[in-house]
Image (cartoon, helix red, strand yellow):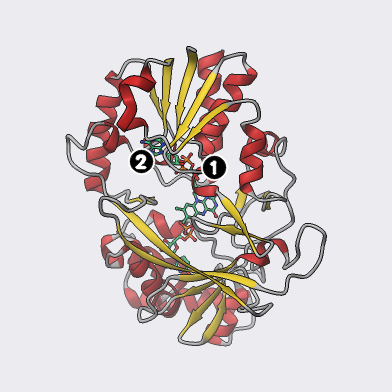
Amino acid sequence: MMYDYLIVGTGLFGAVVAQQMKAAGKSVLMVDKRLHIAGNVYTEQIEGIHVHTYGAHIFHTNNQRVWDYITQFAEFNRFTNSPVANYHGELYSLPFNMYTFHKMWGVVTPEEAAAKIEEQRQAAGITEPKNLEEQAISLVGTDIYQKLIRGYTEKQWGRPCDQLPAFIIKRLPVRLTFDNNYFNALYQGIPVGGYTRMVANMLDGIDVRLGVDYLENKAELDALAQKVVYTGPIDAYFAFRLGELEYRSVRFETEVLDKSNFQGNAAVNYTDKETPWTRIIEHKWFEFGRDAAGNELPKTVISREYSSEWKPGDEPYYPINDEKNAKLYSEYKKLAEQEENVIFGGRLGEYKYYDMDAVIASALELCDSITC
Ligand code: FAD
Ligand code: UDP
């Protein structure tokens, strides 16, 4: 059988392209080296709970097209992400808002909070923030930087905050209101029934081969299709010939506990530098502690996340978008552009710190350019 498209990777990027191509009348074959579909948004059922196997995934978007698209394949619940920060047993609200400022400084009004931040920013002498440390202090002051940002960030990225780009911390909202919603998004939630079911709905009627590594079977698979959409790591595609791009990896230690409530929230971030994990996820709270029939669940499942530098054999999770890696990626991109009949896309194919909605938007745009 000859297919129009071979899509490497059944994550969100590959799934959107496959779904759109099939809808446009093209024939599609998908392969994934993992034994399941859905890439990093994969969820599996343990004790009636949808466990986010590759880390907590909260869908959020301001993009109407993306929302209208994805809600064809799943209904979303009303989950709102409100993580708690634990600094040596002191608990703070995230993202940084009036609850955080009140707990940190005892301030009551937005004016008092703004004045405290300004006072700390001036004392630090920062005018133009040049790195994450300076950006953080100028946004929320020194106390919050030291208790809620420095330890967490250095554990997550494995680099000192003054050597990290400022943009990473700008992802977090800072609000002078009492609002613990982590995202500034119009739409937010978790797909009812889990992400795996949502992706399975997208791939309905599409041929999928699992446990197949494209790079190990390239010639044979290329012969099956006119065009390839590749969503694996771009450097691996070129056999690392220009060198390895760096990633952060994460190890998830998952436990089933014989109690109904471990931490009372889906995510608790451990922001001190001594605790070895960055955060603990308690998966049942993404679905309000209930199963599909609405029954309360007697057990709970938690995952501790340990961040580490990627090495061959590990899963690459977070691209490190610093200057050195950006330069190497741009060299790989030039090679990719010369590759006939191959399109590179997604978080690994484009070496980009994409959220789910951005990956969906990017895949839809690619399909527009192909089918228009
Ligand atoms: P992937 O999901 O990684 O899919 C790529 C697929 O390609 C994989 O299944 C892989 O097995 C396969 N593959 C790779 N190489 C080969 C090969 N040689 N042969 C065959 N198959 C191959 N985004 C949000 O919006 N909200 C969140 O809360 C959020 N949380 C996150 C938490 C973590 C820990 C991480 C790492 C990311 C998070 N994201 C979140 C981002 C989100 O995971 C990505 O935007 C999205 O999953 C990217 O989809 P993708 O298809 O590009 O990549
Ligand atoms: N961050 C922090 N303390 C926290 C949570 C986040 O300092 O409790 C910083 C950290 O540098 C992180 C960045 O904010 O890399 C962005 O956080 P986000 O939750 O968006 O990261 P994600 O895990 O989604 O990539």
The picture places residue 106, in percent across and down from the top left corner, at: 58, 87
Q: Cβ of disc 1 within 8 Å of ligand 1?
A: yes
What residue sits right under mark 2 in the picture?
351
Q: Callout 1: 10 Å neighbours few (<14), some, many (20+)?
A: many
Which amino acid type corresponds to the residue marked 1 in the rendered image? Ala
Query: Which residue was labeled with disc 1?
Result: 38
Q: Nearer the viewer, residue 2 or 132?
A: 2
Q: Earlier in the sequence, mark 2 or mark 1?
A: 1
Q: Residue at x 41, y 39 (%)?
A: 33
- The answer to which of 255 and 237 lies nearer the viewer is 255
Frontmost residue, 200 versus 132: 200
The mark lying in front, picked from 2 and 1, is: 1
Residue 266 percent across, percent down from the top left: 61, 68
| Residue 190 tag number | none
The number of numbered badges drawn on the structure is: 2
Q: Residue at x 27, y 19 (%)?
A: 338
In the rendered image, residue 45, in percent from the top left (x then y), is placed at 63, 57
Q: On the rendered structure, is 306 left or right of 239? A: right
In the image, what residue type sits under mark 2?
Answer: Tyr
